[in-house]
C-alpha cells in the first residue's frame, strides 16, 4: 500500500476477501492504456511496450492502479517481473520515471489481464474519481457506498481540499 492511501472505514480489512489468483489490483478508473500513454512514455505506450518487451497490449485495456494490491508467496514471479521491467524502463530515455507502464507490461507478460480486480471502494482515487461525499465519520459515494481506502495520488496534503481536511479530522478522532 502506498503511503498516500488511508484506511477510512472499520471494515477495511474486508479487502482480504478479494484475494484471488496470483495478485489483485484495483482498476485505475477511466484510464486505458491509450489515455495513460502520455504519463508513461514519450511515444505511444503500446509502441513502447512492444519495442521494449515484445508484448501487444490493446489501447482500450483499463489499467490497474499500483498503489494498493493483494499478494502472497505465489505472486513473487509476477512481482519480480514488474520490478525488473521497471528497472529496464528507467534506463530508456523514451520512458518517464514511473512504474505503471512496467506494471501493464508485467500483467500481460504473465497473462493476468483478465484477473479479478479489487472493488474501487478499496482504492478510491481522490480527484481522479468523482462522486465522493464527505461525512463527519467517513466517506461514501453519491450512491451511498462506503469508501474503505482513500487514495490521494495528486492531492496528498492539499489543505485547500475539503476531503483532505475531513480526513485529518477523522484521523485525529481515532
Image (cartoon, rainbow, N blue to C red):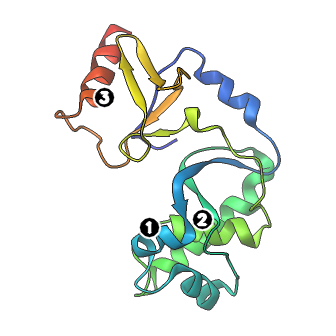
Between residues 115 and 2, which one lies in front from this camera angle?
115
Q: Which is more N-terminal, label 3 or label 2?
A: 2
**Residue at image coords 47%, 74%:** 37
Between residues 13 and 32, which one lies in front from this camera angle?
32
Could you tell me which secondary element the residue under label 2 belongs to?
helix
- Classify the position of the C terminus by image quarter: top left
**Residue at image coords 50%, 30%:** 149
Mark seen at residue 98: 1
Residue 119's x, y, as percent?
Answer: 64, 37
Residue sitting farthest toward the bottom: 51
Q: Which is more N-terminal, label 2 or label 1?
A: 1
Between residues 109 and 125, which one lies in front from this camera angle?
125
Q: Is residue 15 left or right of residue 101?
A: right
Residue under circle 2? 103
Could you tell me which secondary element the residue under label 1 belongs to?
loop
Up/down of 108 relative to 147, above or below: below
Mark seen at residue 62: none
Residue 56's x, y, as percent?
Answer: 70, 82
Q: CA distance from mark 3 to mark 1?
A: 26 Å
**Residue at image coords 67%, 64%:** 80
Could you tell me which secondary element the residue under label 3 belongs to?
helix
Residue under circle 3? 163
Up/down of 10 relative to 158, above or below: above
Quarter of the image where one finds residue 4: top left
**Residue at image coords 60%, 17%:** 11
Give neighbour class at mark 1: few <14, some 14-19, many 20+ (Cα, 10 Å): some
Quarter of the image where one finds residue 139: top left
Residue sitting farthest toward the left: 160
Q: Which is more N-terminal, label 1 or label 3?
A: 1
Give neighbour class at mark 2: few <14, some 14-19, many 20+ (Cα, 10 Å): many
Q: CA distance from mark 2 to mark 3?
A: 29 Å
Give neighbour class at mark 3: few <14, some 14-19, many 20+ (Cα, 10 Å): many
Amino acid at each position: 500500500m502506498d503511503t498516500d492511501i488511508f484506511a477510512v472505514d472499520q471494515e477495511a480489512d474486508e479487502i482480504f476477501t478479494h484475494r484471488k489468483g496470483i495478485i489483485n489490483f484495483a482498476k485505475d478508473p477511466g484510464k486505458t492504456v491509450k489515455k495513460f500513454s502520455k504519463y508513461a512514455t514519450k511515444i505511444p505506450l503500446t509502441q513502447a511496450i512492444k519495442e521494449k518487451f515484445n508484448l501487444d497490449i490493446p489501447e482500450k485495456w483499463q489499467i490497474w492502479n499500483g498503489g494498493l494490491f493483494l499478494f502472497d508467496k505465489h505472486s513473487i514471479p509476477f512481482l519480480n517481473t514488474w520490478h525488473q521491467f521497471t528497472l529496464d524502463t528507467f534506463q530508456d530515455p523514451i520512458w518517464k520515471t514511473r512504474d505503471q507502464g512496467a506494471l501493464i507490461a508485467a500483467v500481460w507478460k504473465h497473462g493476468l489481464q483478465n484477473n479479478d480486480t479489487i472493488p474501487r471502494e478499496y482504492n478510491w482515487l481522490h480527484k481522479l474519481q468523482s462522486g465522493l461525499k464527505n461525512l463527519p465519520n467517513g466517506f461514501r459515494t453519491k450512491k451511498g457506498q462506503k469508501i474503505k481506502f482513500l487514495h490521494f495520488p495528486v492531492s496528498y496534503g492539499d489543505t485547500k481540499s475539503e476531503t483532505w481536511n475531513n480526513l485529518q479530522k477523522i484521523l485525529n478522532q481515532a
